[in-house]
Image (cartoon, grey):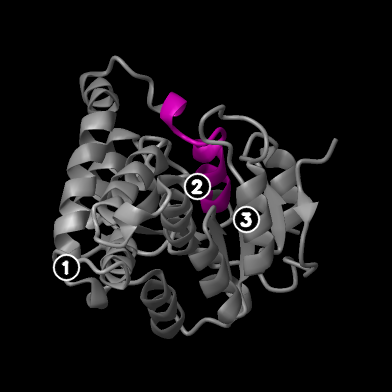
Amino acid sequence: MHSIEIAHAADPKKVPFRYAVLDFDGTLSLIRQGWQEIMIPYFTQMLVETPEGAKKDPKELEQLAREFIFFHTGKQTIYQCIELAEQIVKLGGTPEDPQVYKDEYHARLLRRIDDRLKGLSEGTIDPETLTVPGSYELLSMLRSHGVALYLASGTDEEYVKEEVRLLKLDTYFEGHVYGAQRDYKTFSKKMVIDRIIRENNLSGEQLIGFGDGYVEIENVREVGGYAVGVASNEAERKGIDEWKRERLIRAGANIIIPDYREIGELEAHLFA
């Protein structure tokens, strides 16, 4: 059984890949697995507490929150919080600054994942168990083909760098780890991709991207790069997440994979 699904056919071997851009959460890391279970109830609570929201079925507001949260997945977290503030206004409420919602969400998330971070720091959790299966093999394989690796995440950069270190992935990226900034307009995955192409005088075909979210796949395809959609089932660490798969195909992913277990097959597909 093949682990690679061809979604939008393109020959990846025409020009050798020189640079790769990888998303972090859900693409390499599972430290933050379950973040939706924190954000969706919190945002729903904020919507229910508005004048018009109090009159609505909470299930309806939960679905509203779910839809705009997933629409912005892959961007910096602040964009989900900006949308929350806009929805609160529509429901007759007076929102806080979006940064307030982001800080509260992140505090709740950190409480959930604190044991994972401690376990990694203290050596009681094997880093491999909190990665998408085959992640180390993927990065080693790409490096063996002379591909320079960049990581771009919608999570705040200080946390991304620490979590990359805890998972022992930092040596693969040689300092090229980028994440969200307090001034959110100064960072985006698109900015990272555009800079790589500009500074290294690349053609788009020399860039490959890996991600489990709509944004990074779309950004890679926009510049003519080859996009690998990682429809990782984060909770079970095996199989395909069908919701991710459908979104990744819509975003334009060239191929869909569940993880990197079949690294030999993936290498044969990507490299001559």
Q: Which amino acid type corresponds to the residue marked 3 in the rendered image?
A: Gly
Q: Quadrant of the N terminus?
A: top right
Q: Which residue is mark 2?
A: 27
Bounds of the magenta segment: 128-143
In front: 229, or 88? 88
Q: Is residue 243 visible?
A: yes
Which residue is disc 1 drawn over? 94
Mark 3 lies on residue: 229
Judged by its main secondary structure, the magenta piece is helix
Please report whichever mark, 2 or 3, sits nearer to the chain's N-terminal start: 2
Q: Position of residue 179 (x, y in %)?
A: 29, 60
Residue type indicated by callout 1? Thr
Question: Is residue 139 one of those drawn in magenta?
Answer: yes
Residue 76 coordinates in the image, percent (x, y): 33, 63
Q: Residue at x 16, y 62 (%)?
A: 99
Q: CA distance from mark 2 to mark 3?
A: 9 Å
User: Is residue 210 found inside the magenta-colored segment of the image?
Assistant: no
Taking the image as shown, residue 181 lies to the left or right of residue 125, namely: left
Question: Which sits earlier in the primary sequence, circle 2 or circle 1?
Answer: 2
Residue 208, quarter of picture: bottom right
Q: Residues within 10 Å of mark 2 (few under 14, many from 20)?
A: many
Residue at 63% across, 49% down: 243
Q: CA distance from mark 2 to mark 1?
A: 36 Å
Q: Residue at the spot x=36%, y=35% of the render?
A: 31
Q: Residue 3 at what x, y percent from top left?
A: 76, 41
Q: Earlier in the sequence, mark 3 or mark 1?
A: 1
Is label 2 in contact with label 1 (beta carbons under 8 Å)?
no
* Residue in the foreground of this view, choosing between 175 and 72: 72
In terms of secondary structure, where does tag 3 sit? Answer: strand
The answer to whether 261 is drawn above or below residue 116 in the figure is below
